[in-house]
Image: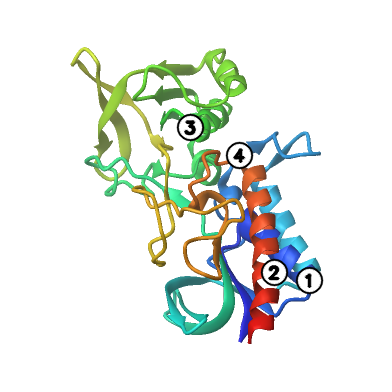
Amino acid sequence: MLDLLIIGGSIAGSTAAVYASRRKLNFKMVTGDIGGEVALSGEVENWPLVNHTTGFEMAEQMGAQLKFNNVPIDEGFMVSEISANGKTWVVKARSLSGEERTYETIAIIIATGVKPKHLVVPGEDDLYHKGVTYCTVCDGPLFKNKITTTIGGGNSALESALMMASIASQVFVVNKNDKFKGEQILIDKLVKLPNVEIIYSAKTQKIEGNEKVEGVTFTLNDGTTRTVESQGVMVHIGNTPNSQFVTVEKDPTGQIIVDDLCRTNLQGVFAAGDVTRVPYKQIVVAAGMGCTAALAAIDYINRFDTRQ
């Protein structure tokens, strides 16, 4: 019987794990990997006390801190089911190789983050890993001196385009809206770059190519259709919460609804980070929520013990 099971190994889950370790809880972290979407971020310049870092470096530092705090981790496992067993919880997880593990715990913190949304247009699935990517940090260097297109209008799209502008010969940015939704400092940097063309109010219709990406076709507000040459397509149009495995109160998009103490509508089940309905999907916000969830879970566990 565990005191606490933390599901997810990105910044929210890792922060919660550090607090759980310092309180000497009998706990475990279950996660597909350490770092999550943070590891796929580009340059990070809004993390407190650090002027500049990268998502990859932050993920490495997370892993080192978890090791320093002797956090027990079942890495490579994805939770498939959470069910009640009286006042405690039974959690089932499975690895990619099919190995199954079952945990019983007093409290749970869900910090599973999000996964990238797809365009759902012809050519997208067929050309995945053949020029289509959802991780510019991972695959961007493969397109050195080539032409690429970034699709999206938020911070992740802006970061993608900025990165590709330093790698590719030309970068198209296709935004379905008439302006960007990201940080102004990123927008200001992007619009000044000579090898970047920004196309507003454009809806992607198809990713062109047979064995590999050859271009992107989109329609404009006036009804005209345009195709731009591209060897790489970076899709950054938002994310979907990784919350399908648990039956808790969620909003229509699948984001878990929590209160000020990161409590869900289920006793002993907490949630933190981007998987929740928190309006600001920022690394520092997720870290704060991980801390809050851990402290609230510790309080719940202490009170749970006195009631037995």
Q: Is residue 119 visible?
A: yes
The amino acid type, in three-letter code, at marker 3 is Ala
Q: Position of residue 240 (x, y in %)?
A: 40, 49
The amino acid type, in three-letter code, at marker 2 is Ile
For the residues bearing labels 2 and 1, Cβ distance under 8 angstroms:
yes
Residue with the mark numbered 3? 157
Q: CA distance from mark 3 to mark 1?
A: 39 Å
Label 3 vs label 1, nearer the camera: 1
Q: Position of residue 147 (x, y in %)?
A: 43, 27
Q: CA distance from mark 3 to mark 4?
A: 11 Å
Residue at x 53%, y 31% (from the top left corner): 155
Is 259 situated above or below 180?
below
Between 194 and 7, which is closer to the camera in this rendering? 7
Which quadrant of the figure contains the C terminus? Answer: bottom right
Mark 3 or mark 4: name the one nearer the start of the chain. 4
- Residue 23: which numbered mark, if any? 1
Between 264 and 303, which is closer to the camera in this rendering? 303
Is 282 situated above or below 199?
below
Residue with the mark numbered 2? 298
Q: Position of residue 9 (x, y in %)?
A: 60, 62
Residue with the mark numbered 4? 42
Which secondary structure lies at badge 3? Answer: helix
Residue at x 78%, y 76% (from the top left corner): 24
The amino acid type, in three-letter code, at marker 1 is Arg
